[in-house]
Amino acid sequence: MEITITIPTLAKGEFYAGIIIKDGKPHHHVILLPGEIEDSGWQKSMDWAPSIGGMLPDCCEQALLFANLKDQFKESWYWSGAQDASNSNSAWLQSFRKGSQRGWDKDCRIRARAVRSILVI
């Protein structure tokens, strides 16, 4: 069965990252929004993302961003929207230097970028 997917229209400054697959099927498009917040703890970053019309990417979306849009990020750590399930004081980070992910203290002050998603219908 052939699937045809149309890339959504992007607003000025947005970048198309790709599609997240769930249960073997295309689930949603990931679009990187312009701008970033620097020197920010996790909660401040979580509050900032909706203020520009997005959300912090989850760990799968972070990996997609690293794979396809690494050049749109500084070689630094960026917050994801995912809390560490084993430690409520931690959330997941993505390195845009080497590509690794890890949990870290939510009070750490680093960078964040926001994404928006569109379900694949």
Image (cartoon, helix red, strand yellow):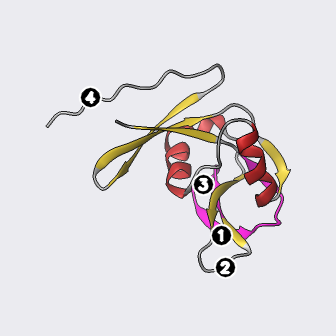
Q: Is residue 10 above or below residue 79?
A: above
Inter-mark Cα distance, 2 to 1: 9 Å
Amino acid on which disc 1 is placed? Gly
Inter-mark Cα distance, 3 to 1: 15 Å
Query: Are discs 2 and 1 less than 8 Å apart at CB?
Result: yes
Pointer 4 residue: 4
Question: SS class of the residue under badge 3?
Answer: loop
Please report whichever mark, 3 or 1, sits nearer to the chain's N-terminal start: 3
Pointer 3 residue: 98
Please report whichever mark, 4 or 2, sits nearer to the chain's N-terminal start: 4
Amino acid on which disc 4 is placed? Thr
Looking at the image, which is closer to me, 26 or 78? 26
Residue 103's disc number: 1
Question: SS class of the residue under badge 4?
Answer: loop
Which of the 4 image quadrants contains residue 44? bottom right
Inter-mark Cα distance, 4 to 3: 33 Å
Query: Are discs 3 and 1 less than 8 Å apart at CB?
Result: no
Please report whichever mark, 2 or 1, sits nearer to the chain's N-terminal start: 2
Magenta stretch in the rendered image:
92-112
Inter-mark Cα distance, 4 to 2: 41 Å
Inter-mark Cα distance, 2 to 3: 24 Å
Which of the 4 image quadrants contains residue 6? top left
